[in-house]
Image (cartoon, helix red, strand yellow):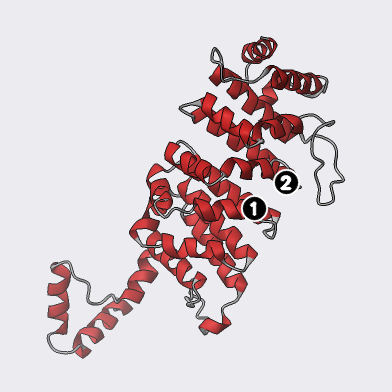
Amino acid sequence: MPRAQDPSQSLLRWGIENAQPGTLRQTAEDIKAGKRPDLNPEILKAMMGQSDAEKMRECMLVIEGHWVDRDGSGEVKNSADITPEDRYRAWEDLEMLIQDLDNANDLQNMGLWDPILKHLTSDDDETVMYACWVCGTAVQNNPKSQKAFLDHDPLPTISSIVSSSSASSETRAKALYALSSALKHWDAAVQRFSELGGWQTLTQTLQDPSLKMRAKTAFLLSQIVTQSPDPSSLLSSLRTASTLPTLIDSLSPSTAVPTGATGEQQAIDRDFRDKGLRFLVNTVERTKGTDGGLSREEKDKVQNAVAEAEQDGEWSHDDVGVAADEWAAFKEELKA
């Protein structure tokens, strides 16, 4: 019985017989030289996938109102037909991509910081929220990206969003996230923030109707006092701006500004209390043995707040993130 012919051999022979004269030889020589004329950009894209840089650029194009079929679904839209949801999804994808430090650093290399920062002043609250989110993620624990961001002097705009009466609580929270990321371990940024009246801004957020904003502010203050090269001077500035007394008063139900949209909530939020106490532990530790620490009146108020916290049967020093001996030392310093 004759052996069955391999169909692929017939196909190969047909291709050779019907190819343009010389094309196969030229293609073979190109491939040998490292070229692939048989693969156009679309084929390569399908085979290899897009680079993150290409994805980031396409996200920005959609955000800017230029349609890109990022899913490869074949959908075509005019620029006027791009919906807010298309743009929001592009923002979300961009934020996810820049969680990678190298991708975040590429924002500067690709010239994307300017268009991103432009959207911080958008009339659309949700767009501002996404822009703040991207900024915060890009510079978080990333000194190179942090410098690129701060070189654009964005703190005036970010600070204004944090204290805005028209921005939503979600947008203000993302702006505070961006602010925290920008100020972390960057003394020049803290100085710039101070020049802008930043401590007054934080005094305001400590009285924000949103408990999340209050807790984030206490966390930011704890971070700043820990990294400060001159904690006594910082404490003096916080006292002058009423930031310090506002935080201390906020730890006690009898003196705290009520929370909620209509001021209906009187109870102290545990997360805020713990972050506020952590700020005070750090403050006492950093100013110990100096003349620039808490005043006697401030210490007395803090002692009352500590006593109230310890009366909570479900609370412990672990909630503040300190060891038992550190907590005991803090309490002793409050008595001094």
Work out whether 160 lies above or below 140.
Answer: below
Q: Foreground mark, 2 or 1?
A: 2
- Residue 29, placed above or below residue 165: below
Asked whether the residues under the numbered discs 2 and 1 touch, taking CB atoms below 8 Å apart as contact, a structural biologist would say: yes
Residue with the most extreme right position: 264
- Graded by Cα atoms within 10 Å as few (under 14), some (14 to 19) or many (20 or more), the crowding at tag 2 reads many
Horizontal and vertical percent position of residue 151: 39, 51
Give the image location of residue 63, x and y in percent: 51, 70
- Which is more toward the observer, 294 or 139? 294
The residue that label 2 is drawn on is 208
Residue 307 image position (x, y, % from top left): 79, 18
- At label 1, counting other C-alpha atoms closer than 10 Å, the crowd grade (few under 14, some 14-19, many 20 or more) is many
**Residue placed at 36% from the left, 68% from the top?**
47
Q: Which of marks 2 and 1 is nearer the N terminus?
A: 1
The quadrant the C terminus occupies is top right
> Does the image show residue 202?
yes
Task: Say which quadrant the N terminus sits in.
Answer: bottom left
Q: What x and y, as percent, mark residue 67?
A: 49, 78
From the image, tell me which residue sits under label 1. 172
The disc labelled 1 sits on which kind of residue?
Answer: Arg
Distance from the alpha carbon under mark 2 to that under mark 1: 10 Å
Q: Residue at x 17, y 77 (%)?
A: 27
Q: In which quarter of the image is residue 113?
A: bottom left
